[in-house]
Image: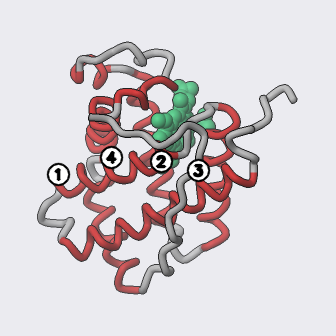
Amino acid sequence: MERMQGEGEVDHLERPSPLTDKERVMIQDSWAKVYQNCDDVGVAILVRLFVNFPTSKQYFSQFKHIEDPEELEQSSQLRNHARRVMNAINTLVESLDNTEKVASVLKLVGKAHALRHKVEPVYFKILSGVILEVLGEEFPEVVTPEVAAAWTKVLATVYCSITAIYEELGWPNVPTSTS
Ligand code: HEM
């Protein structure tokens, strides 16, 4: 059953402490394995998101009415978004020691999703949970509980940054692109 928070609200998570050196290495090593299968993993994550949380499809013109997982998997709009999400995560992982780079990537992502795509921020939290779930299932040898804890921290940091950007932009009353 899909549960959602009240419309428009921005849900807050406490910002986690910065990654330790050990956590950074765990993230980079585990990501190297995941990124070798970038396309398949990205599509598996997004199909899981759209099957388990069908309202998240509402933003995608080309597959919002599709329910069949195999058909979803073939959608070029889904596959393109999967690649974009994976590439953005790759840039973040490559830049874990570069706070400014991380902030600028997240700012672009946050702005585009708030202003252009008008995506409710809660979906970023939902996607984080799905990413953890799929990585744990597909890479059980790599994603040990310690590695999963480090990923939880990275994804919570991403979500905190995204919600901060949404708030800066005045979500839920974001201006339209023409105002
Ligand atoms: C870590 C999370 C995410 C990343 C890194 C990400 C990244 C991107 C990028 C790079 C683009 C293309 C450039 C642009 O239009 O700004 C994009 C487009 C888009 N994203 Fe995301 N995204 C994320 C999460 C989400 C979520 C959770 C949703 C909604 C449930 C979403 C919905 C969309 C839509 C509707 C588009 C436009 C698609 C199109 O025009 O075909 N994104 N995303």
Q: Nearer the viewer, mark 3 or mark 4?
A: 3
In the picture, which quadrant includes the C terminus? top right
Disc 3 designates what residue? Answer: 10
How busy is the neighbourhood of tag 2: few (under 14 within 10 Å), some, or many (20 plus)? many
Q: Nearer the viewer, mark 2 or mark 3?
A: 3
Q: Is residue 84 visible?
A: no
> Residue 81, image x and y in percent?
46, 34
Which of the marked residues, 1 or 4, is nearer the chain's N terminus? 4
Describe the colour scheme in one phrase: secondary structure
Disc 4 designates what residue? Answer: 38
The residues tagged by marks 2 and 1 sit, at their Cα atoms, a distance apart of 21 Å
41 in relation to 162, above or below: above
| Circles 1 and 3: CB atoms closer than 8 Å | no
Disc 1 designates what residue? Answer: 138
The residues tagged by marks 1 and 4 sit, at their Cα atoms, a distance apart of 12 Å
> Residue 123, image x and y in percent?
46, 42
Which of the marked residues, 1 or 3, is nearer the chain's N terminus? 3
Q: Of helix, strand and loop, which one carries label 1? A: helix
Extreme residue toward the bottom, this view? 21
Residue 124's disc is: 2
The residues tagged by marks 3 and 4 sit, at their Cα atoms, a distance apart of 30 Å
| Circles 2 and 4: CB atoms closer than 8 Å | no
Q: Residue at x 30, y 22 (%)?
A: 72
Q: Residue at x 75, y 47 (%)?
A: 170
Q: Nearer the viewer, mark 1 or mark 4?
A: 1
Respond yes or no on whether mark 2 lies under 8 Å from ligand 1.
yes
40 in relation to 135, above or below: above
Q: Nearer the viewer, mark 1 or mark 3?
A: 3
Q: Nearer the viewer, mark 2 or mark 1?
A: 2
Which of the marked residues, 2 or 1, is nearer the chain's N terminus? 2
Q: Of helix, strand and loop, which one carries label 2? A: helix
The residues tagged by marks 1 and 3 sit, at their Cα atoms, a distance apart of 31 Å
